[in-house]
Image (cartoon, coloured by chain):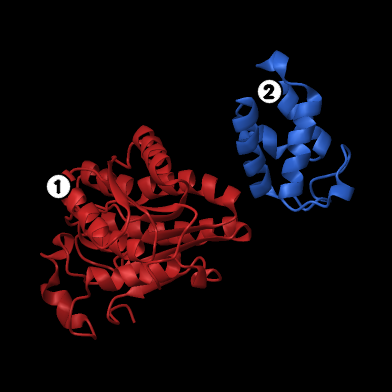
Amino acid sequence: MTAATEHPGCALVTGASRGIGAAIACALAVDGWPIGVNFKNDAGAAAATVERIQGAGGRAFAVRADVTDAEQVEQLFGSVEGEFGKVLVLVNNAGVRSDDLAVSLGDSEWDEVIDTNLTAAFRVTRRGLRTMIRERFGRVVNVASIVGPRANVGQSNYAAAKAGLIAMTKTVAIEVARRGVTVNAVAPGLIETDLTQDLDGKMLAAVPARRPGTPAEVAACVCFLASEDAGYVTGSTLFVDGGLSV
Amino acid sequence: MSTAVTEDQIEKVVVDSLESFGADPDDISRDATLEQLDIDSLDLAELSQIVQERFDVELKGSDVADVKTVDDAIKLIAASV
């Protein structure tokens, strides 16, 4: 990987203001991709991600958009394409959690997690693919989770969304494979982020690596799946979990 | 819009698109079936995008699904503009 690589388009990372999304944005920028840094709420964190990228010699700008809103998704693509050209790498990372036992989980908590983690990823992917299939090149990487393939108490909504994301990844992958577009997922395990800081107690003991992963380790896997070298990898889910799912 | 678009213009867009999808130019005729040309559903989805961009019409998925020949495609687009 070299920072000097010139790409004919750009990468869009949803939910890129913090945590894994920010790490992915920074890593793809090192690989030479201009980055659309999507965020929903935290403009300050998104600006900090952009500054990190620019400080390292990369190109990036922040775009506020709620990916659960179809109109805002269209505007998001319009903004990014206007700044950096066609979106050839799309990373669906935006996600939320709203945990509770199924017996007490409310409809709104269910809907919010499904809407953001699954439906929005589909909507953004559909928009992205329309360009990628015309360009005969594209990389979609969905940030799933080991929760989904693996059970986790209190996360029936999150598990359903992430398992759905992996299933969607496989089907979309075979639909567009002949156009040079790959669609893959990464499934992080226990990663040190704001989203998981209250989860780790019991789970950490179950991780064969005996440590949480880092956002940079997830980002490195995303960079591989987004690379030219991964052109024959599609429909796959790369587990980044220290062996937890084995 | 509709008065400005001729069937010849539509045919050119369709034929150019089919060639870009990998169809052999020698095999493309109005009577040729999409199956003969190895044109699949993804190709038709892409053709719908191209048609929308060129002629500002949105083809219904159910109508596109009924397209069997090059002539069907041209007539569907002509009826929509």
Residue nearest the viewer, comparing A122 with A203: A122
The residue under the point 37% across, 67% down is A3
The residue under the point 32% across, 45% down is A115
Residue B42 coordinates in the image, percent (x, y): 64, 48
Q: Chain A hue?
A: red
Residue A201 coordinates in the image, percent (x, y): 10, 74
Q: Quadrant of the C terminus of chain A?
A: bottom left
Q: Amino acid at mark 2?
A: Ser
Q: Which residue is mark 1?
A: A44
The answer as to whether the residues below labels 2 and 1 share one chain is: no
Query: Residue A188: in sight, yes or no?
Result: no
Q: Secondary structure at mark 2?
A: helix
Q: Secondary structure at mark 1?
A: helix
B73 vs A9: above or below: above
Q: Chain B hue?
A: blue
Residue nearest the viewer, comparing A11 with A68: A11
Q: Amino acid at mark 1?
A: Gly
The residue under the point 85% across, 44% down is B28
The chain that hosts pointer 1 is A
Q: Quadrant of the N terminus of chain A?
A: bottom left
A198 vs A91: above or below: below
The residue under the point 72% across, 42% down is B17
Residue A211 coordinates in the image, percent (x, y): 17, 81
Q: Which residue is mark 2?
A: B80
The chain that hosts pointer 2 is B
Residue A37 coordinates in the image, percent (x, y): 29, 50
Nearest to the eye among marks 2 and 1: give it: 1
Residue nearest the viewer, comparing A105 with A190: A190
